[in-house]
Image: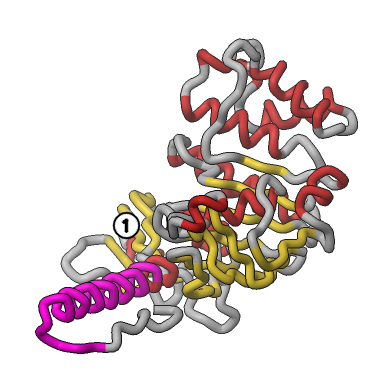
């Protein structure tokens, strides 16, 4: 569905090139996203996430390499098929109302049965009572929900979210997560591109995570890991005989050392976790908290950046030493994937 082949993107004109001031935002990025996949883009500021998104939307063209969406150039695909997009910054005319904004987006996107669609998304995103409110009067969270509502208006096969849950409270983050899962289930060929600094949320939403740094793909992390470890959680409960009840709902549960009524449990995903928690609550236990362990993505992301930071520091120290005439070294780049 989405293909990037050795994509380079530089910013700056001919004069900047002559002065050596051009900025290389992407440096040989190759990505293949098949139909039905949900891919997270993660990395520090300036890693290239937003540049990839703008290329996929057709706002930018690559300096070198190729970008295709559905076998077409991104701009052609967006014009013919449409792309659902939730930007990192929501900018709308402040005098528009919530309903007026959705009507405008429905018209621009040539959405069929717009009145029905608008009614459905306003109800789903909890915007019904705010339909007549002006954009200028919306809180950050309500404005973000409006952005998500407009993305769900059309029947699209590609959705791009850039910090799409920024500003939402935990309850709405969880509800949007379920909406995304529902959106994907409605069409097995739909593709979700989810860029975020929230690694735990990426791990819940995406099938794979692309770790970017300095415009390069450093690692691809499989978050569904066929045959890999199941997601683990810290579960805190109350109630009589809670250890037995936890063990019945979560076979293999282990007590957390030094914490009363806390257990380490595993589940096969969000639906399996919900089912097991339902069994536990039905047995009379009171669930105080469920917290995911630091997952594979967070561990590998932090480890990878730490290695690159250490490598850069060693290179800088070596170059300083060369400048002082102390030693002579070959300052190689840190190995790819570090």
What colouring method underlies this structural image?
secondary structure
Residue 334's image quarter?
bottom left
**Which secondary structure type mostly characterizes the magenta part of the structure?**
helix
Q: Position of residue 323 (x, y in %)?
A: 16, 76
Above or below, comparing residue 129 to residue 109 in the picture: above
Image point 31% across, 76% down: which residue? 307
Residue 277 visible, this angle = no
- Residue, disc 1: 236
Q: Quadrant of the C terminus?
A: bottom left
Q: Which residues are magenta?
A: 301-329
Q: Position of residue 93 (x, y in %)?
A: 61, 18
Q: Is residue 319 left or right of residue 98?
A: left
Residue 83's image quarter?
top right
Q: Is residue 79 left or right of residue 126?
A: right
Q: Nearer the viewer, residue 136 or 24?
A: 24
Q: Nearer the viewer, residue 267 or 180?
A: 180
């Amino acid at each position: 569905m989405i293909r990037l082949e050795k994509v380079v993107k530089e910013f700056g004109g001919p004069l900047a090139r002559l002065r050596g001031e051009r900025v290389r935002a992407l440096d040989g990025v190759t990505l293949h996203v098949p139909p039905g996949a949900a891919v997270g883009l993660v990395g520090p500021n300036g890693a290239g996430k937003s540049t990839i998104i703008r290329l996929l939307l057709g706002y930018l063209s690559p300096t070198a390499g190729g970008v295709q969406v559905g076998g077409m150039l991104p701009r052609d695909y967006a014009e013919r098929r449409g792309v659902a997009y939730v930007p990192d910054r929501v900018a709308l005319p402040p005098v528009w109302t919530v309903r007026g904004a959705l009507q405008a987006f429905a018209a621009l996107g040539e959405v069929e049965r717009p009145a029905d669609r608008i009614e459905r998304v306003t109800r789903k995103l909890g915007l019904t009572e705010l339909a007549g409110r002006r954009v200028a009067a919306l809180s950050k969270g309500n404005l973000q929900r409006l952005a998500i509502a407009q993305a769900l208006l059309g029947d699209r096969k590609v959705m791009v979210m850039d910090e799409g849950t920024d500003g939402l409270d935990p309850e709405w983050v969880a509800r949007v997560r379920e909406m995304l899962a529902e959106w994907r289930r409605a069409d097995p060929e739909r593709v979700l591109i989810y860029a975020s600094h929230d690694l735990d949320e990426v791990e819940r939403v995406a099938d794979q995570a692309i770790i970017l740094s300095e415009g390069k793909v450093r690692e691809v992390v499989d978050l569904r890991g066929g045959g890999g470890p199941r997601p683990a959680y810290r579960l805190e409960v109350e109630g009589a005989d809670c250890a037995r009840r936890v063990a019945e709902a979560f076979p293999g549960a282990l007590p957390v050392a030094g914490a009363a009524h806390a257990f380490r449990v595993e589940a096969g995903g969000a639906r399996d976790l919900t089912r097991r928690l339902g069994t536990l609550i039905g047995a009379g236990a009171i669930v105080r908290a469920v917290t995911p362990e630091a997952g594979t993505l967070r561990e590998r992301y932090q480890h990878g950046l730490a290695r690159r930071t250490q490598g850069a520091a060693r290179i800088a120290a070596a170059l300083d030493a060369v400048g002082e005439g102390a030693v002579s070294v070959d300052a190689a780049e840190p190995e790819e994937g570090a």
